Image (cartoon, rainbow, N blue to C red):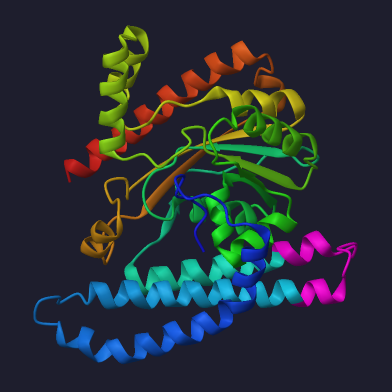
Amino acid sequence: MRISALPSLPAPPMWLRLLLQALYPFVGIVVSLLFVVITPCLLLLWPWDRRLALLRCLFLALYVMWEDIGLVVECWYLRLRSPRGTSPTWDADHLELIQRALDHVLFTARRVVGFHVEIEGELTVGRPGHPLVVISRHAGPADSLAIAWLLASTAGRIPRVVLADAMLWDPGIAMVLQRLDSYFVPSRSGAGDDRARGVAELAATLTAKDAMLIFPEGRNWTRERHEVQVRQLKARGEAERLATAVARPWVLEARSRGVAAIRERAPEADVMVIAHTGLDMISGPAAVVRAVPFRNRLLLRGRTFRSEDVPTDPDEVAVWLERQWGQVNHWVDTHVSGREHL
């Protein structure tokens, strides 16, 4: 269950989503049988792969698939209990589903590949009676899953996530997040206005029990993407933005439009800014396999601001977000430098 996205993949049409939901359990059975067949072969690779990293990764992927299938089945059950989705416990039931699934996945990931989350310092998740907006850096494998776990299981808030519509290919997580009124950002070209409008409409519906999660960089940070960003700014002659990008090697540019739309439509929401590090340099399936078992934990820091301390004017939001992103880069740089000197 992965709350990230491949932005080049268009969303499936509705008929295909329904077909994927119906076929998913059968796909899981077939994949499980294949795993049983190839496991002896993977065990024979032990002289070359003493950590059995590939076997661990495939087992975890299979486990995550079955958790996802479980979400689909349980969502069907909840729909049978409340065909119109009007049950008084509708939101609570779906929050429980995602809490349980995330708990199980993170527990298993720690045991199988060493993935674990550590929170630096005391974490406050907003004031009672106020919605929470979470603005996070996006880097490394499963960071979005860890943050969703933080909001659902640790904070007890209903996650309302802004994510790419490519995630509609994932039947389980898509079903739950759609029912919790998350926003799947259109990937088609020329959809800029639609994206901002959708974010604003979601923000306007936030209640005191909700946490809206947005990644203003729009994509996962990698060293290569940062280098491409620097080259593009240099080619366009944008000296000021170039200087900022060069000075902040651990983040991509934060786009303020979505955050400004949220602040305009949900000015009463407290705001948390999340920085994290530990698995930044791991990108792509091959790098993940090479890194297993993970030696570093995902270290996460959240800084929460009261709603009245965060601007709502779009220009002021842009300045505020730039300042926060500079602090996020500094925090990451400090911790990366600390690891390198161990």
Instruction: Provide the residue span drawn in magenta.
Output: 77-95
Q: Give the residue drawn at x 60%, y 18%.
A: 317
Residue 325 in the image, given as x and y percentages of width and height: 45, 25
Residue 48 in sight: yes
Residue 230 in the image, given as x and y percentages of width and height: 28, 23
Q: Nearer the viewer, residue 211 or 2?
A: 2
User: Would you say 73 lies left or right of 33 here?
Assistant: right
Quadrant in the rendering for residue 231: top left
Q: Does the magenta stretch include residue 74?
A: no
Q: Give the residue drawn at x 62%, y 65%.
A: 16
User: Would you say 122 lies left or right of 58 here?
Assistant: right
Residue 334 in the image, given as x and y percentages of width and height: 30, 33
Against 194, residue 174 (above or below) is below
Q: Give the residue drawn at x 57%, y 81%.
A: 25
User: Would you say 56 lies left or right of 86 here?
Assistant: left
Q: Which of 234 and 57 is in front in this view?
A: 234
Against 238, residue 166 (above or below) is below
